[in-house]
Amino acid sequence: MTMGNPIYENELEMAASIGVIREYLRDPKKIPEWNSGVTHVIKVSGTTMEYTLIRVYQSKRVKEHLTISYLNKDVINFKVGGGKIDYQMKFSLTKLAENRTLIRESIYILETNDRIVNDFSEVIKPFMRAAFKDNLSDLKAYFAKEKIE
């Protein structure tokens, strides 16, 4: 499923209960609310946990395939492929207090990428890390704006 150790991890504390965050992240239709790069999420017909993500890159629509799985109730796994880079995002949730949750986001580059992507993974890591960290910060800002606890 993954390629060993993550290429990086981001952590963020949120002022919301672990249950609320868990249910929110388990609903892929909510991804565009906190990931501005995704414009639409469409369920793949006849599947339970597979979706198509629609992104816009340089005025072109790009489709990616998203598969969601749960390693346990507090670890949500997003596997994304078919775009520029195939990757896996693992969200691990830890309850800190009644309405405080730590989200650890682990990012893995998948073996399905072509050799060029793998060869340049060291170059693209800082850009990917910044983009994923921004998305996590946007998730926190969305929860604060909507007063989700």
Image (tube, grey):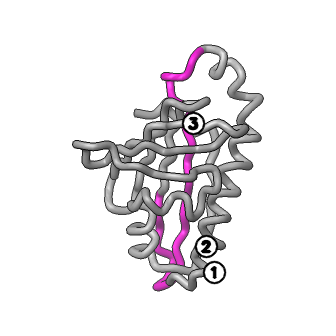
- Which residue carries the number 1 mark? 145
**Between disc 3 and disc 1, whose residue precedes?**
3
Given residues 53 and 71, the one toward you in this image is 53
Q: Position of residue 111 (x, y in %)?
A: 50, 23
Quarter location, residue 79: top left
Q: CA distance from mark 1 to mark 2?
A: 5 Å
Q: Which mark is residue 3?
A: none
Overall secondary structure of the magenta section: strand
Q: Residues within 10 Å of mark 1 (few under 14, many from 20)?
A: few
What amino acid type should be assigned to the residue bearing mark 2?
Tyr
Name the residue located 47 percent from the left edge and 67 percent from the top edge.
94
Which residue in the structure is indicated by mark 3? 62
Residue 47: x %, y % from top left: 25, 43
User: Hey, what amino acid is under mark 3?
Assistant: Val
- Residue farthest to the left? 46
Q: Nearer the viewer, residue 59 or 3?
A: 59
Residue 74, by quadrant, is: bottom left
Q: Is residue 59 left or right of residue 25?
A: right
Locate residue 61, reporting x and y percent: 59, 38
Callout 1 amino acid: Lys
Local secondary structure at mark 1:
helix
Q: In the current view of this chain or complex, which residue is farthest to the front?
A: 59
Name the residue at 49% across, 45% down.
53
Q: Is residue 34 above or below residue 20?
A: above
Percent position of residue 3, x then y = 49, 30
The mark found on residue 142 in the picture is: 2
Magenta segment boundaries in residue numbering: 92-114
